[in-house]
Amino acid sequence: GPGWERQFAVNHLGHFVLVNRLRPAFSEDGTRVVSVSSAAHHRSPIRWDDPWFGDGYDKWEAYGQSKTANVLFAVHLDALARDAGVRAFSLHPGAIATPLQRHLPREEMVAAGWIDEEGRVINPDFKTPEQGAATQVWAATSPHLVDLGGLYCEDCDIAVPADRAEPPAAGVADYAVDPGQAERLWAFSAELTGVDAFR
């Protein structure tokens, strides 16, 4: 939509619309929706006073806000749809060296310690794409998550609150799993997009 911050629109609103449009295809025998977030959700809660960054743009804060939205989306989707057999989870796949970084300046990635001057990955915490996919597959299929939902996962486990996390785990920020914030975001998203198949 006009004036929407692009990362929020792509990373959250597009997925919000997709899941709402797919609602008729969901099975009451155990559908799971997995929302890929990131530990970057720690960079920003939802900026209710300025979600489109009219007061100055910071790409990392905008990315963080969009990743917080992914977590809150799963929290409220699970609350709305669990009685219909739909459970929702969000997760941090880990830091992964993929072509997504192609839009970042090389100097920024070198300064962050992700790559060396020749472009080789040097950060030992980076995962392979296969390792990064593991938590997504686990959240979608694990029998350990039967009868659970609305949870944030990392490293093929349910994440702990951020204040109890031990590196390399980051845990989940309290504001990202707050049911009131999740409900508010759902209403905001439905108003912006004009879709809400779960009410």
Image: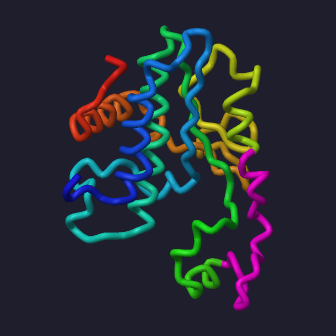
Question: In the image, is residue 115 part of the stretch drawn in magenta?
Answer: yes
Q: Is residue 185 above or below residue 170?
A: above
Residue 5 falls left or right of residue 26:
left
x%, y% of residue 95? 67, 60
Give me the residue at 76% from left, 59% from top. 127
Residue 8 falls left or right of residue 166:
left
Question: In the image, is residue 147 part of the stretch drawn in magenta?
Answer: no
Q: What colour scheme governs how the chains and residues are painted in the rendered image of this protein?
A: rainbow
Q: Main secondary structure of the magenta part?
A: loop
Q: Is residue 107 above or below residue 160?
A: below
Q: Quadrant of residue 85?
A: top right
Q: How many marks?
A: 0
Give me the residue at 49% from left, 32% from top. 74
Q: Is residue 26 above or below residue 119?
A: above
Say which quadrant the C terminus sits in: top left
Q: Residue furthest bottom?
A: 117
Residue 46 falls left or right of residue 92:
left
Give me the residue at 58% from left, 53% from top. 39
**Residue toward you, 14 or 189:** 14
Residues shaded magenta: 113-133
x%, y% of residue 109? 61, 79
x%, y% of residue 66? 42, 51
Give me the residue at 45% from left, 46% from top. 68
Q: Residue furthest front?
A: 25
x%, y% of residue 162? 59, 45
**Residue toward you, 122 or 5:** 5
